[in-house]
Amino acid sequence: MAAADQPVDRAAVFSALRARVARMERGAAADAGTLSLSEEIDNALPGGGLARGALHEVLAADQGAAAAFCALILARATGCVVWIGATPDAWPPGLSAFGLDPADLVMVRVERPADGLWAFEEALRSPAVAGALLTVRGAPPDMVAGRRLQLAAEAGGGVGLLLMADTEQTPPSPARTRWRINATAAEDMERPCWDVTLLRCIGGRAGAWRVVWDGDAATLGLAPDGEASSSSAVAAQ
């Protein structure tokens, strides 16, 4: 790995990434449309599910819960996924508990934010990638960078996830949705419970749900003690 103060050979890195993706034998572009999260959440989303070919933001009120939520989304994208970060902050066997097959996972380590954005954009642009995630350290991408990422996702057809810290200073962006994910106490440790808040959704409704993940059935549903709530307001930003 190149030192933090040395430039990354971007051509070599992405050539290796393309070779890895090719070995996974997924050459076709992802189908346009949506992927399902749960019946209750899907009802708040335009098209009845999370949009493919689009950029989405996930704010981590709890890092572990947010990573698990992202793994669930990427697993349902069905195909090769790219997880990009400055440190090995994702454990493939742990992500598999949320349906993400380690055989479909390409881990990319980048030291500098600019290199992470580049790798993320290139992954999104590839029709061989079903989904890509960038763990953002520091300031989130500005509007110009966000538009480039959205255009790259539209070109490739996959799902793009920006996993970011939950702060009050999150700027406007062209992302289709913005989520906040927090962990809640769960009686059964094998059935984690999360507070999922849809803060913003272009063409849809904001909402909040307390959900539980059933790993045996691979389903996400409302927790027994949690009522769904949603806003009728359409988020425009």
Image: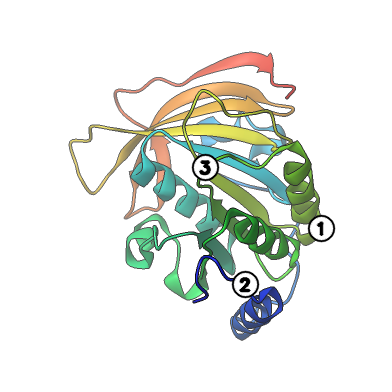
Residue 10 at what x, y percent from top left? 68, 73
Q: Are marks 2 and 1 in contact (CB under 8 Å)?
A: no
How far apart are labels 3 and 2 at the CA level? 20 Å
The residue type indicated by label 3 comes to Gly
Residue depicted at x 56% and y 55%: 133
Q: Where is residue 169 in the image (x, y as percent from the top left)?
A: 55, 25
In the picture, residue 88 is in which quadrant?
bottom left
Residue placed under numbered mark 1 in the picture: 155
The reply to whether the C-beta atoms of the residues labelled 1 and 3 are less than 8 Å apart is no
What is the CA distance from the residue labelled 2 to the residue labelled 1?
25 Å
Mark 3 highlights which residue? 138
Determine which residue is flagged by label 2: 8
**Res. 200 in view:** yes
**Residue at the far left in the pictured view:** 187
Query: Decide: marks 3, 2 in contact (CB < 8 A)?
Result: no
Residue 226 as seen in the image, left or right of residue 12:
left
Q: Which marked residue is nearer to the observer: mark 2 or mark 1?
A: 2
Q: Considering depth in this image, is 165 or 41 the residue closer to the camera?
A: 165
- Residue 7 x/y as whole percent: 63, 70
User: In the current view of this chain or complex, which residue is farthest to the front?
Assistant: 5
Q: What residue type is labelled 2?
A: Val
Nearer-N-terminus badge (3/2): 2
N-term mark: 2 or 1: 2
